[in-house]
Amino acid sequence: MNVGFIGLGAMGRPMALHLLKGGHPLGVYARRPESARPLEEAGAKAYGSPAELAAACDAVFTIVTTTRDVEQVVLGERGIAEGARPGTVVVVMSTIDPAASRRIAEELERRGVEMLDAPVSGGEIGAMAGTLSIMVGGKPEVFERIRPLLECMGKTIVRIGESGAGQVAKMCTQLAIVATLQGIAEAVTLANAAGVDASKVLDALEKGAAASHLLELMGRRMVNRDFAPGVEARLHHKDAQLVLECARDAGLALPLAALATQTFNALMARGGGKLDSSAIVTVVEAAAGRR
Amino acid sequence: MNVGFIGLGAMGRPMALHLLKGGHPLGVYARRPESARPLEEAGAKAYGSPAELAAACDAVFTIVTTTRDVEQVVLGERGIAEGARPGTVVVVMSTIDPAASRRIAEELERRGVEMLDAPVSGGEIGAMAGTLSIMVGGKPEVFERIRPLLECMGKTIVRIGESGAGQVAKMCTQLAIVATLQGIAEAVTLANAAGVDASKVLDALEKGAAASHLLELMGRRMVNRDFAPGVEARLHHKDAQLVLECARDAGLALPLAALATQTFNALMARGGGKLDSSAIVTVVEAAAGRR
């Protein structure tokens, strides 16, 4: 299968390399040609537009950042839809609004082009190691066709349901993450305010019922005030907003999702978007009356 | 060392048995004599009051439920303080308000009696397996003297700091737990409302960055509407209230602690106190506008 990849940033580059290493002929497109260079050096072929790339491919993956970016790359001028033949599969691995994802899929379907939404969890580390979690929405038969390609990039690949379901699962993941982060930040703030060594508290928490990878990683960063990313807060901020949009579309009030989003809003306002998300502890402290 | 134990409920009974099995001569006291019977059959000696028990012991453990219960057993009529000799160590394993814990310790200190606060995490399963996490506050030399006894009951034993610090650590644990539960409940509610199979969503979440023991255990119960305990919600409810009292004493606003406590308040109001804590998903759904 000829495979295309668009979105060669910190996530996309290692993911595309895994497809190459898996023995799949790879074409790429990048707005800035220098972004494509490392892939070309590894054997990929660069194209001049998403449309040209799509015309040469059976499946085109994209992991650009925003909903607008995805719409541009897929449906915009010289976008994937212009070049793709009927039967081609577009795999959108960006995290975007489920409703927007369904709209794009419907637009493609009208042209006979298939789409899967396949957002990922696991960050740059997971992308480099090829151990991402990939949550997929779309037709079962299209999923089965694309699964071997996804297996080059991820370790856990779950088809959640129909179109948009992968994005909903990603929203649920992000909701659970920002909620847990808010809880850890409040726990660390409580330990500090009560005059107790928060590092010792983490020693105990990490072995108890509240134990989690997030607690170990982010709790330590909060205690050590070590806010070098990690995952930049602006990315969790973006996803938290998407969770709220998804909740609104589903007709839902989710108070913790709203609270955690406010915390990230405040961190952005304080200029912390490029810090690690553990920096929300500074906002939680301020809101708690501590600083 | 002669050891005493008071509070022979679902947690205390297996913990006391571990002390016996560890080869320590054990005395017990129970308000209702039948509660002491299983321990007597295993070789423990029953006493008629906490004071009589304390007079025969070098260390007395207690894991009764509320702050009031602890005050009664330790400082009340025929309480531990009446019988204990100078140098005796009282180990309070109940989860109580850190400020109250410090007051009780100071009262004992005036009589030359030592105290450790040593609340536990890990539930009945951890108590039976002897794998509890024990968070300790008090003097280092007293901790070192008691540590071998704690090691009979727990796997992770951390001295957090001075008097009350164990209770603060437990508050942080409970805060992290109820916060995470609220987040999981909102994520499950979002999946259901968005028309996606929440069970599949959990399949993906359990392998991603949000993975935790709580997510696996409680997320499944929420999805399956299986609310048999587990941990009864009334216990998390009690501890959530303590977290808020601890925050107030520390001069802190903790919005997520407050939110999660409201959720448990509402579950209690709906008569769900003896359900598993995963039943908070029903409150989250109602608050979200779903039921």
Image (cartoon, coloured by chain):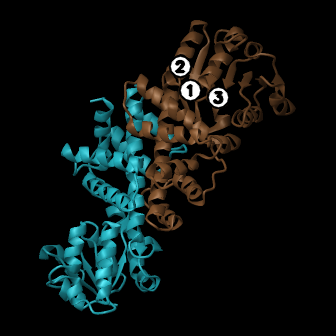
Chain colours: A cyan, B brown
Q: Which residue is mark 2?
A: B100
Q: Mark 1: few, some, or many residues within 10 Å (few <14, many ≥20)?
A: many
Q: Are marks 2 and 1 on the same chain?
A: yes
Across and down, in percent, residue B20 comes to 77, 32
* Image quadrant assignment for residue A248: bottom left
Across and down, in percent, residue B124 comes to 67, 42
Q: Are marks 2 and 1 in contact (CB under 8 Å)?
A: yes
Does A104 appear above or below B7? below
Label 1: chain?
B
Identify which amino acid the numbered label 2 is placed on.
Ala
Identify which amino acid the numbered label 1 is placed on.
Ile
What element does badge 3 sit on?
Answer: loop
Label 2: chain?
B
Q: Which residue is mark 3?
A: B65
Q: Mark 2: few, some, or many residues within 10 Å (few <14, many ≥20)?
A: some
Q: Mark 3: few, some, or many residues within 10 Å (few <14, many ≥20)?
A: some
Q: Say which label, 1 or 3, has the lower sequence index.
A: 3
Q: Which residue is mark 1?
A: B96
Q: CA distance from mark 2 to mark 1?
A: 7 Å
Q: CA distance from mark 1 to mark 3?
A: 8 Å
Residue sitting at x 40%, y 70%: A166
Name the side, left or right, on which A234 lies relative to A178: left
* One can see residue B126 in this view: yes
Identify which amino acid the numbered label 3 is placed on.
Thr
Does B43 appear above or below A83? above
Across and down, in percent, residue A219 comes to 39, 43
Judging depth in this view, the residue of A174 and B61 nearest the camera is A174
* Image quadrant assignment for residue B142: top right
Q: Say which label, 2 or 3, has the lower sequence index.
A: 3
